[in-house]
Amino acid sequence: MDDAKNRRHISVFALVTALCLMGDSMLYTVLPVYFQQAGLTSLWEVGVVLSVNRLVRLPLNPFIGRLYSRISERTGVCIAVLLGILTTLSYGFLQGLVWWVLARCVWGLAWSLLRIGSLFCILKISTPTTRGLYNGLYNGLYRLGSLVGMLGGGVLADMVDLRFCAVVFSLGTACALPALLAISRTEGGVEAMPEDTGVLAGLRLAASARNTLLTVLCGAAVTLVLQGVVASTLSRLIAVHTDGGVCIAGFMLGAATLAGMLQALRWGCEPWLAPLTGKLADTRYGWQLLFLYAFGCGAIIFALLALPLPLPLWFACLLGMQATATALTTLADTGAANASAETGGRSLLMAYALLTDMGAAFGPLLAYSLNALFGINTVYALCAGLFVTLFVLWKPFAGR
């Protein structure tokens, strides 16, 4: 396929993912408030429900990789959409922790199909001069589902109830079915890759070269910090630095509201910021050099967030963190795709998916364990230290 068709293909894939993601994202704003409507009895059960879909992906990913050696990405996405419709609709009718855990495990399967399918698809149709752009395009568009789900879910739940939200967003996910017809069977330069998509084979490939191993580990560290620590503790960090909230134009905005607004701002900017990052990575600057700069910026910003700065400056650092998060996520995916193309196997992407899911799953546990011992500012200072370490380790490869 030519570049225009490839971009359309990735855009449709991303928008289908966004439609599937709305119901999942809705739960993160609605369930902590209306958990009793779901038959849950306490907030710890909410925590289990919101995390089990990530944990179940760890054993599922190897199975999904093997499955994609036998089916096309379009077939995998079709299965994911059907599962997304069923699970989102079920959120309005389930009662009790056991049923919710089962539904979230099914959603974990659907997300694995979407996530791994997208990695394989981009690898298949991209070239070294378009890989960053395609990763940025996909990452930027699919997060629109999180934006709509979190903002729309909160409004609908406050106006009506959880069941109404579930029905509305399941109908929204169903809109992805006609779009599946636009996802063609992809062609590209890596069709002749080995069929082995096992995680062990991928780990062996990663360990075969220092730069490949470091690329995969950097991706895992990025998700640990951004999808694990930041996603689960941002409202806590804001609450500590603002004493619970801030007053703007006579309105008191709580920490949770501010965190939601910052996340929404990031996802609203990603459709242009992520492709721009990817496009720059495909130019003479190279993704390796940009990755180094992004680690450096991340280290500085996280260190500043741990300090008692004046609130205007501190909030400016929060905005900088959101932009850096977009860049790091896009560059990590681009690096993994490039490493997979160079090593000649999709199995490396399986190892990458497994390690990044581990980071996302265990990041919140690590963050709150350290928070209980040392406080939230120390958690962000340690994240800054991790980025400094990655900056030093990555520097020898930045000029390649």
Image (spheres, grey):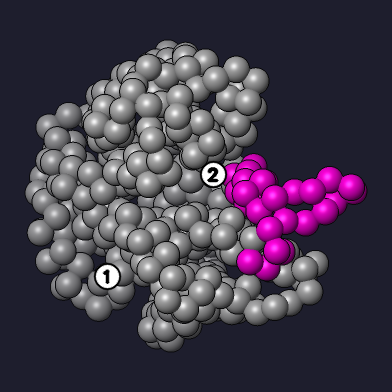
Q: Earlier in the sequence, mark 2 or mark 1?
A: 2
What residue is disc 1 on?
212
Does residue 61 sit above or below 171 in this rendering? below
As drawn, is 389 to the left or to the right of 326?
A: left
Viewport quadrant of the C terminus: bottom left
Q: Secondary structure at mark 2?
A: helix
In the image: residue 195, left or right of residue 92: left
Q: Please tell me whether residue 55 belongs to the stretch shown in magenta.
A: no
- Disc 1 packing (10 Å; few <14; some 14–19; many ≥20): many
What range of the chain is rendered magenta?
A: 240-269
Task: Identify the residue at the far right of this view.
Answer: 249
Residue at image point 42% right, 83% down: 389
**As drawn, 90 above or below 351:** above
- Pointer 2 with pointer 1, Cβ within 8 A: no
| Residue 137 in view here | no
Residue 262 on the magenta span: yes
Q: Residues within 10 Å of mark 2 (few under 14, many from 20)?
A: many
Q: CA distance from mark 2 to mark 1?
A: 25 Å
Q: Give the residue drawn at x 50%, y 49%.
A: 136
Q: Nearer the viewer, mark 2 or mark 1?
A: 2
**Residue 109 percent coordinates (x, y):** 25, 35
Horizontal and vertical percent position of residue 56: 23, 44
Nearest the viewer among 108 and 268 is 108
